[in-house]
């Protein structure tokens, strides 16, 4: 950034509730997501022009439950392209909250720059009373324009909070303060448009990540299976038959697996399918158990099932060796 000039920030719009419209001002659910354009989002918050030279680019305009691997690849390439240019000091991505944490973690592992990348969204559509999108967008631009945000990897900022893409996730279906981390904690807060950082995520990301996109045209298929009482191996067998290269099992407690399901996962592993053991709890560490070592399963550390899936997808683009995948889960 040139001295005395405003930072240059590009807003990439993907859709979601922040770009949504309801039938009336009191409708905060059952609205249509992904309606407003990036130009409309910027026009609604003219104060961002006091923070930065802002430009916008429409990547997609969809509800985020419809996100795809191909859209992730497109978005990651666009972010890398922008950040490699001297006339871009940071990127803000407006995104639906359903899968915001997944897109953020994918970018956290594939963006090759220390410049700020900030994911923002909203829990109420733009037409609602008390819509949270405008302030979230303002704070997102303020954060991306700050030197303090450099080197943290991809950040998630909603409701005045700053979190790492690795640790932060959606914790409530409809509340304004839906986003937060589990035990790891927030990185900081946004107060009157100023970021206040107190912590830093120590796991590898962005410029220290080994994952590249140069020759990547698609991601390996990895399915998530949810463990429960009286489980079966039927869905395991179905995933294998459908061509899954990896399976993430969201187990009970500390990665518990029903006996029949474990048998199916062991057979899948013998056929070359990588198995990662996670927990459906959403909080805490999944340990490596002797039975999992014998089965050549990988423990997820404290990654949620949905983020373990992303790391496994990227890991399988590099290797199918269990020891190498296990190493990745220990450092990312």
Image (cartoon, grey):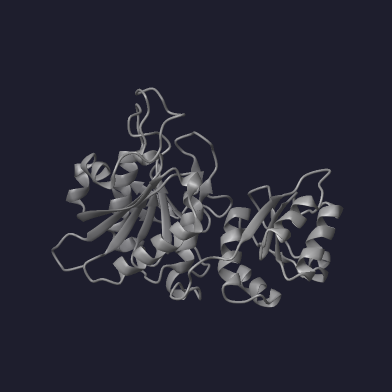
Query: Where the N terminus falls, by quadrant?
Result: bottom left
Identify which residue, 214 or 148, lies in the foreground: 214
User: Is residue 272 shown above or below 179?
Assistant: below
Q: Is residue 263 above or below residue 129?
A: below
Left or right of 305, for residue 157: left
Residue 38 visible to the viewer? yes
List x then y, in percent, for residue 245.
66, 66
Q: Quadrant of the C terminus?
A: bottom right
Please name the residue shown 40% across and 38% down the image: 33
* Residue 212 left/right relative to 116: right
Q: Where is residue 37 shown, x and y percent of the image? A: 29, 44
| Extreme residue in the left direction | 4
Q: Is residue 314 left or right of residue 191?
A: right
Find residue 168 and report its horizontal and vertical position in percent. 51, 52
Residue 200 visible to an observer of this rendering = no
Q: Residue at x 52, y 49 (%)?
A: 169
Rendering quarter of residue 113? bottom left
Depth check, front residue: 327 or 66: 66
Name the spot of residue 78 as percent of width and height, x first. 35, 64
Q: Pick the residue in front: 66 or 332.
A: 66
The residue positioned 60% from the left and 71% from the top of the image is 316
């Amino acid at each position: 950034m040139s001295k005395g000039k405003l930072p240059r920030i590009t807003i990439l719009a993907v859709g979601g509730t922040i770009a949504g419209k309801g039938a009336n001002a009191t409708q905060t659910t059952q609205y249509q997501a992904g309606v407003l354009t990036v130009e409309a989002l910027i026009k609604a918050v003219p104060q961002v022009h006091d923070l930065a030279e802002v430009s916008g680019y429409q990547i997609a305009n969809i509800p985020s439950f419809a996100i795809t691997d191909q859209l992730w690849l497109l978005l990651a390439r666009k972010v890398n392209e922008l950040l490699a240019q001297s006339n871009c000091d940071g990127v803000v991505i407006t995104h639906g909250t359903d899968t915001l944490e997944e897109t953020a973690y994918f970018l956290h592992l594939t963006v090759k720059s220390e410049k700020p990348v900030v994911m923002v969204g909203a829990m109420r559509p733009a037409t609602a009373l008390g819509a949270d999108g405008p302030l979230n967008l303002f704070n997102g631009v303020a954060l991306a324009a700050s030197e303090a945000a450099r080197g943290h990897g991809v950040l998630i900022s909603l409701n005045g909070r700053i979190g790492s893409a690795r640790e932060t996730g959606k914790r409530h279906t409809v509340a304004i303060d839906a986003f937060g981390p589990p035990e790891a904690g927030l990185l900081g807060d946004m107060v009157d448009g100023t970021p206040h950082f107190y912590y830093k995520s120590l796991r590898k990301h962005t410029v220290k990540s080994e994952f590249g996109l140069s020759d990547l045209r698609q991601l390996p298929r990895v399915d998530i299976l949810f463990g429960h009482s009286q489980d079966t191996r039927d869905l395991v067998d179905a995933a294998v038959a459908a061509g899954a290269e990896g399976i993430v099992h969201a187990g009970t407690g500390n990665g518990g697996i029903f006996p029949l399901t474990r048998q199916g996962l062991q057979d899948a592993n013998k056929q070359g399918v990588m198995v990662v053991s996670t927990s459906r709890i959403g909080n805490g560490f999944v340990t490596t158990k002797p039975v999992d070592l014998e089965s050549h399963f990988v423990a997820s550390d404290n990654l949620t099932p949905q983020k373990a899936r992303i790391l496994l997808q990227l890991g399988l683009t590099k290797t199918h060796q269990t020891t190498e995948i296990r190493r990745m889960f220990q450092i990312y």
